[in-house]
Amino acid sequence: MEDDRLYHDPDLADFYDLENGWARAPDFDYCQALARDAKSVLDLGCGTGELAAALAEGRMVVGVDPAPAMLDIARAKPGAAEFIEGDARTLRLDRRFDLVLLTGHAFQVFLTPEDRRAALATIAAHLAPSGRFIFDSRNPACREWEEWGPEESLRLVEHPRLGTVSAWNDIAHDPATGIVTYGTHYEIQATGKRLSAASRIAFPDKAELETLIGEAGLKVDRWLGDWEGNAWHEGAKELIPLGRIA
């Protein structure tokens, strides 16, 4: 994740908000509702800071991300959120929060059980005694990566400076590790210039997450299967634990 150009290259990071459509995202709405009674929020893997900035009105919010290019975008946004460059596996702020978030499938950048264990330890280290945490990870049983091929993912993006941009993805799945490598490609129609990045994400299953969450001293109150708040079931596309300190 440290050298993923999709997040570290300013030219590529510039597409992030255009592609993710935060104002329409169900996780955005769910987290805003979840934070209603929280006086402090830690947003791990905050990216361009859209959620952190939205939550900062009336409460203390800290957004953390390892990519300076993403944080440059975040810091240019209006709002009172504090943004810190840091790694969710090793971060220690010596502060505790009412709500700790790790959304946008950022948990999947942790490619090994050791990485995931370290990220969960960070969540536990920053939760207030009565605080809550939530994160999301795609359900590997749904094999969502099979929908990310060039034909399925081909789209047009209207960039405010570059004009119309053709975008698509490609994927490779390693059955031995469960890691998916996906390419993201942008071709500027006016110039033909192409920007590309290769990213790797893991798809841990629910049993592994349950074990690691327990080892971190956390407990899950509810497993959600989507960001509409529906209960998890075997065919659910998402694994979303909502919990607290054990």
Image: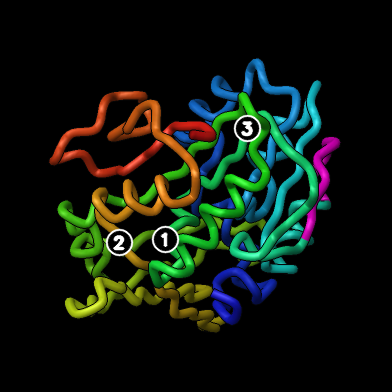
The quadrant the N terminus occupies is: bottom right
The three-letter amino acid code for the residue at tag 2 is Phe
Number of on-image labels: 3
Residue 177 against residue 82 in the figure, above or below: below
Whichever of labels 3 and 1 marks the residue nearer the N terminus, that label is 3
Tell me which residue sits at (29%, 55%) in the image: 208
Label 1's element? helix
Residues packed near mark 1 inside 10 Å, few (<14), some (14 to 19) or many (20 plus): many
Q: Report the magenta stretch's main SS.
A: loop
Which residue is labeled 1 in the image? 108
The three-letter amino acid code for the residue at tag 1 is Gln
Residue toward you, 241 or 128: 128
Labelled pair 3, 1 in contact (Cβ < 8 Å): no
Using the rendered view, name the quadrant where residue 31 is placed: top right
Looking at the image, residue 109 sits to the left or right of residue 211; the answer is right
Labelled pair 2, 3 in contact (Cβ < 8 Å): no
Q: Of all residues shown, which one is farthest toward the top?
A: 37
Label 3's element? strand
Labelled pair 1, 2 in contact (Cβ < 8 Å): yes
Label 2's element? loop
Q: Please give the range of residues in magenta.
A: 76-84
Residue toward you, 128 or 84: 128
Q: In the rendering, at what x and y percent does residue 24 appear? A: 48, 33
Which residue is labeled 2 in the image? 203
Which residue is labeled 3 in the image? 99
Q: In the rendering, at what x and y percent does residue 168 appear? A: 36, 69
> What whole-number distance in Å separates the C-alpha atoms at marks 2 and 3?
24 Å
